[in-house]
Image (tube, rainbow, N blue to C red):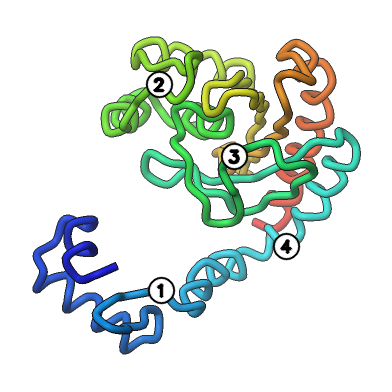
Amino acid sequence: MTLSEVAAAAGLTRAGARRILLTLVQLGYVSLDERKFRLTARILDLGFAYLSSMPFWNLAEPIMEALVEQVHESSSASVLEGTDIVYVLRVPTHKIMTITLGPGSRLPAYCTSMGRVLLSGLDDPQVDSILRRSKIEARTPWTLTDRGELRKLIAEVRARGWALVNQELEEGLVSISAPIRERNGRILAALNVSGQANRTSPQQVVKRFLPPLRAAAERLSDLLRRRS
């Protein structure tokens, strides 16, 4: 991107963006070539620094791999950051999304099953604040966009302990999620299983995937409690 493009995307003045970019160039995270700024491979250090600072995720991966082996569908884990979920682990099987996902990928919390599980761990004022700040739009014909209805749905997720989203994020994608809890009961992360709607109905997703998903989430919660 050019300096002007970076400034516009970040909502900064050209002078402010230039100072930040030159600092990132000096640190090795950005390169400058013919007036174009590009990220370098060193930017990956920032993401892996997060994962390496929490050895729990290294221990969690085998549990997720066992879950994927059992259900024959992809599984991911994410945390809440602002109005988005951020992927920290993903164990894929078949490519079922047009979006390419991996650690560091972000998706809106309001229309994802993991996002609704993570939001259910907050109190009502916090949920209201995130929904107000979210850019809520219909990503598919089935996306729930009414903030009042979303609040009710998140309260239901809080009561039952899991969330199902059927083609609200992307057509053809159905996902079910459960919470990973710390020792004090706080939801640290969400774990999901996702599949193709034309192959597995929402009712089948709940029947087939929810028991092993909740068992895996509980094993991860136990692991987290032992390490905290």
Which residue position holds label 4? Answer: 58
218 lies above or below 116: below
Q: Residue 192, how many percent across, how many down?
A: 68, 35
Which label's residue is closer to the chain start, 3 or 2? Answer: 3
Q: Nearer the viewer, mark 2 or mark 4?
A: 2
Q: Which residue is mark 2?
A: 138
**Lower position in the chain sequence, tag 1 or tag 2:** 1
> What's under tag 1, amino acid-wise?
Leu
- Upstream in the sequence, badge 1 or badge 3? 1
Query: Mark 2 to mark 4: distance in Å?
Result: 35 Å
Contact (Cβ within 8 Å) of mark 1 with mark 3: no
Which secondary structure, mark 2?
A: loop
Quick one: label 2, few (<14), some, or many (20+) residues within 10 Å?
Answer: few
Q: For the point 25% across and 77% down, which residue is it?
A: 21
Q: Measure how far apart labels 3 and 2 are at the Cα level.
A: 17 Å
Marks 1 and 4 sit apart, C-alpha to C-alpha, by 26 Å
Q: Quadrant of residue 175?
A: top right
Q: Secondary structure at mark 3?
A: loop
C-alpha separation, residue under disc 1 versus residue under disc 3: 24 Å
What residue do we see at 24% from left, 80% from top?
35
Q: Earlier in the sequence, mark 2 or mark 4?
A: 4
Residues at circles 3 and 2 in contact by the CB criterion of under 8 Å: no
Of callouts 4 and 3, the N-terminal one: 4
Which residue is at 63% across, 16% downward? 160
Q: Is residue 134 left or right of residue 191?
A: left
Residue 68 in the image: state x and y as whole percent: 83, 41
Label 4 sits on what residue type? Asn
**Residue 39, disc:** 1
- The mark closer to the camera, 3 or 2, is 3
